[in-house]
Image: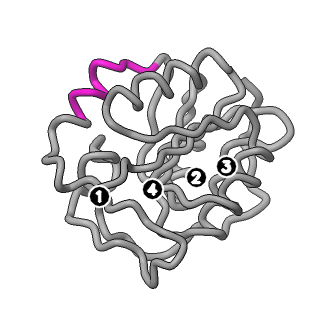
Amino acid sequence: MDHPRVLVVDDDVDVGELMREALSRWGHDVTLATSGREAVRLISHQIFDAALVDIWMPEMDGLQVLDEIKRHDPALEVVMMTGNPMVETAVQALKSGAYDYLIKPLNLDEMQHSHAAGPREALPEPRGALAAEPALRPPGGQGSGRWLAGHDAREGSGGHGGRTPTRPC
Protein backbone atom coordinates (compact mmCIF):
# COMPACT_ATOMS: atom_id res chain seq x y z
CA MET A 1 0.00 0.00 0.00
CA ASP A 2 1.21 3.51 -0.79
CA HIS A 3 1.80 5.89 2.06
CA PRO A 4 -1.02 8.37 2.74
CA ARG A 5 -0.22 11.75 1.19
CA VAL A 6 -0.40 14.78 3.46
CA LEU A 7 -0.14 18.42 2.41
CA VAL A 8 1.32 20.72 5.08
CA VAL A 9 0.65 24.43 4.50
CA ASP A 10 2.51 26.89 6.74
CA ASP A 11 4.35 30.10 5.92
CA ASP A 12 6.75 29.35 8.81
CA VAL A 13 9.26 27.07 7.09
CA ASP A 14 10.58 25.76 10.42
CA VAL A 15 7.11 24.60 11.49
CA GLY A 16 6.51 23.06 8.07
CA GLU A 17 9.79 21.16 8.18
CA LEU A 18 9.07 19.95 11.70
CA MET A 19 5.67 18.65 10.56
CA ARG A 20 7.19 17.05 7.46
CA GLU A 21 9.81 15.27 9.57
CA ALA A 22 7.31 14.00 12.16
CA LEU A 23 4.68 12.87 9.65
CA SER A 24 7.30 11.18 7.48
CA ARG A 25 8.51 9.20 10.51
CA TRP A 26 4.91 8.10 11.06
CA GLY A 27 4.72 6.70 7.53
CA HIS A 28 3.21 9.55 5.52
CA ASP A 29 4.33 11.03 2.23
CA VAL A 30 4.47 14.78 3.01
CA THR A 31 4.42 17.76 0.65
CA LEU A 32 5.14 21.19 2.09
CA ALA A 33 3.63 24.45 0.79
CA THR A 34 4.81 27.75 2.26
CA SER A 35 1.85 29.83 1.06
CA GLY A 36 -1.84 29.47 0.43
CA ARG A 37 -1.41 30.12 -3.28
CA GLU A 38 1.19 27.35 -3.52
CA ALA A 39 -1.19 24.98 -1.69
CA VAL A 40 -4.01 25.75 -4.13
CA ARG A 41 -1.68 25.06 -7.07
CA LEU A 42 -0.63 21.75 -5.50
CA ILE A 43 -4.16 20.50 -4.82
CA SER A 44 -5.16 21.26 -8.40
CA HIS A 45 -2.37 18.98 -9.71
CA GLN A 46 -1.93 16.32 -7.02
CA ILE A 47 -4.13 14.14 -4.88
CA PHE A 48 -3.75 14.24 -1.10
CA ASP A 49 -5.37 12.19 1.63
CA ALA A 50 -5.20 14.93 4.29
CA ALA A 51 -3.97 18.50 4.77
CA LEU A 52 -2.64 20.47 7.72
CA VAL A 53 -3.20 24.20 7.11
CA ASP A 54 -2.02 27.19 9.14
CA ILE A 55 -4.72 29.81 9.53
CA TRP A 56 -2.63 32.98 9.74
CA MET A 57 -0.68 33.42 6.49
CA PRO A 58 -0.05 36.47 4.30
CA GLU A 59 -1.77 36.95 0.92
CA MET A 60 -4.15 33.99 1.29
CA ASP A 61 -5.08 32.90 4.79
CA GLY A 62 -5.84 29.36 5.87
CA LEU A 63 -9.62 29.80 5.81
CA GLN A 64 -9.43 30.82 2.16
CA VAL A 65 -7.15 27.83 1.50
CA LEU A 66 -9.70 25.59 3.26
CA ASP A 67 -12.47 26.92 1.02
CA GLU A 68 -10.39 26.28 -2.10
CA ILE A 69 -9.46 22.77 -0.95
CA LYS A 70 -13.10 21.92 -0.24
CA ARG A 71 -14.18 23.32 -3.61
CA HIS A 72 -11.58 21.14 -5.30
CA ASP A 73 -11.97 18.00 -3.15
CA PRO A 74 -14.79 18.00 -0.56
CA ALA A 75 -13.64 14.61 0.81
CA LEU A 76 -10.12 15.82 1.68
CA GLU A 77 -9.68 16.01 5.44
CA VAL A 78 -8.24 19.35 6.49
CA VAL A 79 -6.85 20.10 9.94
CA MET A 80 -6.39 23.77 10.73
CA MET A 81 -3.46 24.99 12.88
CA THR A 82 -3.02 28.33 14.62
CA GLY A 83 -0.79 30.03 17.12
CA ASN A 84 -3.46 32.67 17.70
CA PRO A 85 -6.56 30.74 18.73
CA MET A 86 -9.89 32.52 18.61
CA VAL A 87 -13.21 30.79 19.18
CA GLU A 88 -14.77 32.56 16.19
CA THR A 89 -12.03 31.36 13.87
CA ALA A 90 -12.26 27.79 15.15
CA VAL A 91 -16.03 27.74 14.68
CA GLN A 92 -15.69 29.26 11.20
CA ALA A 93 -13.07 26.67 10.22
CA LEU A 94 -15.17 23.74 11.44
CA LYS A 95 -18.32 25.10 9.76
CA SER A 96 -16.33 25.47 6.53
CA GLY A 97 -15.44 21.79 6.59
CA ALA A 98 -12.26 21.52 8.66
CA TYR A 99 -11.91 18.14 10.34
CA ASP A 100 -10.08 19.47 13.39
CA TYR A 101 -8.40 22.59 14.80
CA LEU A 102 -4.98 22.39 16.49
CA ILE A 103 -3.30 25.03 18.65
CA LYS A 104 0.37 25.90 18.18
CA PRO A 105 2.85 25.22 19.48
CA LEU A 106 1.91 21.72 18.39
CA ASN A 107 2.64 18.95 20.84
CA LEU A 108 4.12 16.23 18.63
CA ASP A 109 3.91 13.68 21.45
CA GLU A 110 0.14 14.20 21.61
CA MET A 111 -0.15 14.12 17.83
CA GLN A 112 1.82 10.88 17.69
CA HIS A 113 -0.34 9.38 20.44
CA SER A 114 -3.49 10.38 18.53
CA HIS A 115 -2.02 8.96 15.38
CA ALA A 116 -1.00 5.70 17.05
CA ALA A 117 -4.35 5.33 18.85
CA GLY A 118 -6.15 4.12 15.75
CA PRO A 119 -5.49 0.87 13.94
CA ARG A 120 -3.26 1.09 10.85
CA GLU A 121 -6.05 -0.26 8.68
CA ALA A 122 -8.09 2.84 9.54
CA LEU A 123 -5.69 5.01 7.53
CA PRO A 124 -7.29 6.16 4.31
CA GLU A 125 -6.49 4.23 1.22
CA PRO A 126 -4.43 6.56 -0.96
CA ARG A 127 -6.61 7.93 -3.69
CA GLY A 128 -5.55 7.83 -7.31
CA ALA A 129 -6.45 10.11 -10.18
CA LEU A 130 -8.95 7.55 -11.47
CA ALA A 131 -10.75 7.00 -8.14
CA ALA A 132 -14.46 7.09 -8.91
CA GLU A 133 -15.57 8.12 -5.45
CA PRO A 134 -14.00 9.15 -2.13
CA ALA A 135 -12.78 6.36 0.10
CA LEU A 136 -15.31 5.24 2.69
CA ARG A 137 -14.07 6.03 6.16
CA PRO A 138 -14.89 4.39 9.48
CA PRO A 139 -16.50 6.58 12.13
CA GLY A 140 -14.07 8.79 14.05
CA GLY A 141 -15.98 11.92 14.80
CA GLN A 142 -15.16 15.52 14.00
CA GLY A 143 -12.55 16.96 16.29
CA SER A 144 -11.59 13.56 17.63
CA GLY A 145 -7.88 14.22 17.22
CA ARG A 146 -7.58 11.05 15.14
CA TRP A 147 -7.50 12.80 11.77
CA LEU A 148 -4.81 10.50 10.37
CA ALA A 149 -5.73 7.35 12.23
CA GLY A 150 -9.54 7.31 12.05
CA HIS A 151 -11.80 9.17 9.70
CA ASP A 152 -15.46 9.95 9.54
CA ALA A 153 -17.74 10.00 6.53
CA ARG A 154 -19.05 13.54 6.78
CA GLU A 155 -20.94 15.03 3.88
CA GLY A 156 -20.99 18.49 2.44
CA SER A 157 -18.31 20.94 1.53
CA GLY A 158 -17.18 24.34 2.63
CA GLY A 159 -18.10 26.94 0.06
CA HIS A 160 -17.97 29.81 2.52
CA GLY A 161 -15.60 31.80 0.31
CA GLY A 162 -14.52 35.28 1.21
CA ARG A 163 -14.43 34.78 4.98
CA THR A 164 -11.18 35.79 6.56
CA PRO A 165 -9.84 35.93 10.10
CA THR A 166 -10.72 39.12 11.93
CA ARG A 167 -7.19 39.95 13.12
CA PRO A 168 -3.69 39.09 11.95
CA CYS A 169 -1.26 36.95 13.90
Determine whether, in the image, residue 134 is placed left or right of residue 58: left
Mark 2, residue position: 92
Question: Residue flagged by tag 3: what amino acid is it?
Answer: Leu
Is tag 3's residue or tag 1's residue first in the polypeptide sequence? 3
Please report the bounds of the magenta region as a residue range.
106-114
Mark 1, residue position: 151
Q: Are marks 2 and 3 in contact (CB under 8 Å)?
A: yes
Q: Nearer the viewer, mark 4 or mark 2?
A: 4
Q: Residues within 10 Å of mark 1 (few under 14, many from 20)?
A: many
User: Residue 145, percent across and down?
Assistant: 30, 41
As measured in the structure, the alpha-carbon distance from the residue carrying label 4 to the one carrying label 3 is 19 Å
Q: Are marks 3 and 1 in contact (CB under 8 Å)?
A: no
Mark 3, residue position: 63
User: Residue 110, percent across and down?
Assistant: 27, 23
Determine whether, in the image, residue 159 is placed left or right of residue 36: left
Q: Nearer the viewer, residue 126 or 149?
A: 126
Q: Residues within 10 Å of mark 4 (few under 14, many from 20)?
A: many
Q: Are marks 4 and 1 in contact (CB under 8 Å)?
A: no
Residue 49 badge:
4
As measured in the structure, the alpha-carbon distance from the residue carrying label 2 to the one carrying label 3 is 8 Å
Where disc 4 sits, the SS reads: loop
Q: Nearer the viewer, mark 4 or mark 3?
A: 4
Where disc 2 sits, the SS reads: helix
Question: Residue flagged by tag 4: what amino acid is it?
Answer: Asp
